Amino acid sequence: MGINQVDPIVFVIQKVRALENLQSLSKHEQLVQGVLDAIDEGGLRMNAALPSVNTMISELGYARETIVKAYKELMERGVIASKNRKGYFVISGNIRQQQKIALLMYAFDTFQETLYNNLKAHIDRDVQIDLYFHHNNPDVFEAIFNRIVGHYGLYIVAPIATKRIQELLTTIPPFKLLVIDRQLSLGNDYSYITQEFRTSSYQMFQKLTAKLAVYDEIIFFFRKNTAEPPEILQSFRKFLKETGLKGTVKKQYESGSIERNKVYFTIHNPELYAILKDVMDKKWKLGKDLAVLAHNDDVVKEIIAGGITTFSADFAEMGRLAADYVRTREKIQRVVPTELYIRKSL
């Protein structure tokens, strides 16, 4: 049955009940958010009547004081009004008058900072952005989610690909959620601005074949069970198999272990800096004695050591597209292309 066929009062009750399992929300907050979600999703339109206080008591079992308090807050926000002896009615579909955004990211690395700065620069100054970091830890993600859900008009989330997190995110109406950075299938109604790793990484390795073939070996430092995308590792192994180039995967870089005539590839910025320090200490020349390749471009990599060759999605563009969504709320499903930036290090 479509939204237009559902009785508005039944629809509001459904939206409130959908929030009852969220322990982070009080009953009062569940009522307020349920009404707002019903308006968001078109089930409660201008001039539509809300359930009476007695109906709410009968259907939900909430205390009269709780329901009255929730309706009073909605009136103070200018969303509903009380008409003498006729109940409560919707008087505004604009529920975003004071917009607050929750931005939940992996960590505040330089490229994530680029995304954040471009998002902030392209939205209205009165829009508040609260930053949270889950560090690719599902337990941390869920704890943050339960603490913030229901308190923001929009959630911009870099997800972790687990079934539980998928379930949590689909409790947010599509209008209020934008998935960024990593893809997670939530259904066709949800918006995303993400990057792709498997095909794009393989294409980048292919483009670099001639440069990589100059060296004796390619060493890729990759940490399992981290935020580092496993698709890049899979593409690397496929590339080695198809080209016959020699390559090795190691868990991490050990200080002082660099050797001449090898390519060192890392996703992890602190690891990159440790490699570059050892190159400097040995007074070797990047792009001649050895080579370095990195993932995720940023302004530091443009400058440091004469420039580091990288392949990366455009995080500035990701931030600008996210800002467009904040302003318009028009559905977007965009994969930001990966680009190759060839510099002195390779």
Image (tube, rainbow, N blue to C red):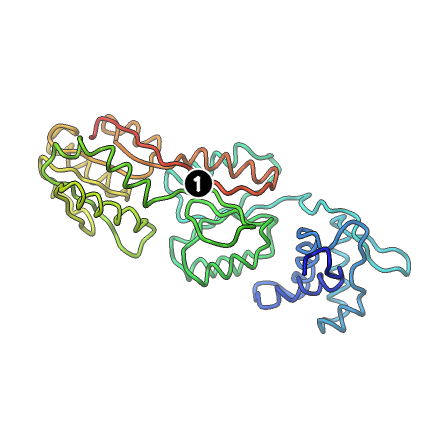
Count of marks, rendered view: 1
Relative to the observer, which residue lies in front, 306 or 248?
248
Q: Quadrant of residue 292?
A: top left
Residue appearing at x 18%, y 44% in the figure: 240
The picture places residue 194, in percent across and down from the top left corner, at: 44, 43
- Say few, some or many: other residues with alpha carbon within 10 Å of mark 1 (under 14 / 14 to 19 / 20 or more): some
- Quadrant in the picture for the C terminus: top left
Residue appearing at x 58%, y 48% in the figure: 154
Left or right: residue 316 compared with residue 99? left
- Quadrant in the picture for the N terminus: bottom right
The picture places residue 273, in percent across and down from the top left corner, at: 24, 38
The picture places residue 303, in percent across and down from the top left corner, at: 29, 27
Regarding mark 1 in the picture, which secondary structure is present there? strand
The residue most toward the right is: 84
The image shows residue 60, relative to residue 227, as above or below, that is below
Residue appearing at x 46%, y 53% in the figure: 185
The picture places residue 252, in percent across and down from the top left corner, at: 20, 49
Relative to the observer, which residue lies in front, 25 or 55?
55
The image shows residue 163, relative to residue 266, as above or below, that is below
Q: Quadrant of residue 245?
A: top left
Question: Mark 1 — residue?
Answer: 335
Left or right: residue 39 compared with residue 271? right
- What amino acid is labelled 1 in the image? Val
The image shows residue 337, relative to residue 32, as above or below, that is above
